[in-house]
Amino acid sequence: MIEIEKNFDLRSGQRERLITGARLLGRKIITDSYYDLVDYSLTRRDYWLRRRDNRWELKVPYNAAAVGDRLTDRYHELETESGIIAALQLPAGQLLEQSLTAAGYKPFVTMVTTRESYQQGEFHLDFDEMDFGFTTFEAEIMVSDESAVVKVETKIKDFAKQYGLTSAHGRGKVIEYLYRYRSEHYQALVAAGVIVEP
């Protein structure tokens, strides 16, 4: 599956408009630990390895355009240990956690997120509040066919326009954490072109 998503900065009253007529999918608390090597070589490629509530996930970029030219963020989501091992080119035949430890991967942040999710038509809406005092909103659509990506990006652009959403520099939660607390890591991602500063 390809996840096509966009973070937005919400102004007063926009949340209420967004959820009017939407179906509440649920509320949950998520604990994420994000991993990288000491030289940030994984996140400098825009790969995001996390352990979410004891399940490993890897987001691999599906982006032809440079970061500053992207309308949305696009990722393949890998959720099997074998898929993650192959994508990270780790030795087969071991458990993922053992392979990661042996290769030197370590967590660089663990955060707890309180998430409220809604379905608004074909859009999945997540309102997140993190334990370090940051909130964010994300709209996403999942597709299985690569030929649908451009059409979905247009839908997200139209969705933002319909609700008056500001999308220019909305930061995701991990990028915001790095900006606030891990400036060396943040600047490494800026230098690699993974982050475009406002």
Image (cartoon, rainbow, N blue to C red):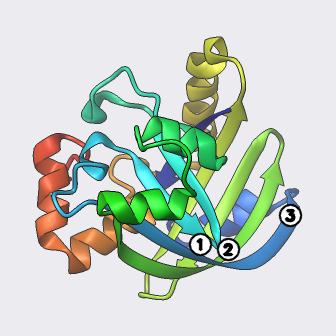
Q: Which residue is mark 1?
A: 128
Residue 5 seen in the figure? no
The amino acid at mark 2 is: Arg
Q: Where, by quadrant of the figure, is residue 181 drawn?
A: bottom left
Percent of width and height locating residue 138: 57, 55
Give the alpha-carbon distance from disc 1 to disc 2, as whole Å: 5 Å
The amino acid at mark 3 is: Leu
Q: Residues within 10 Å of mark 1 (few under 14, many from 20)?
A: many
Residue 130 seen in the figure? yes
Q: Is residue 16 left or right of residue 91?
A: right
The amino acid at mark 1 is: Asp
Give residue 25's mark. Answer: 3
Do the residues bearing badges 1 and 2 touch, measured as CB atoms within 8 Å?
Answer: yes
Q: Which residue shows up at 62% across the image and 49% down it?
A: 81
Q: Earlier in the sequence, mark 1 or mark 2?
A: 2
Do the residues bearing badges 3 and 2 touch, measured as CB atoms within 8 Å?
Answer: no
Q: Nearer the viewer, residue 7 or 146?
A: 146
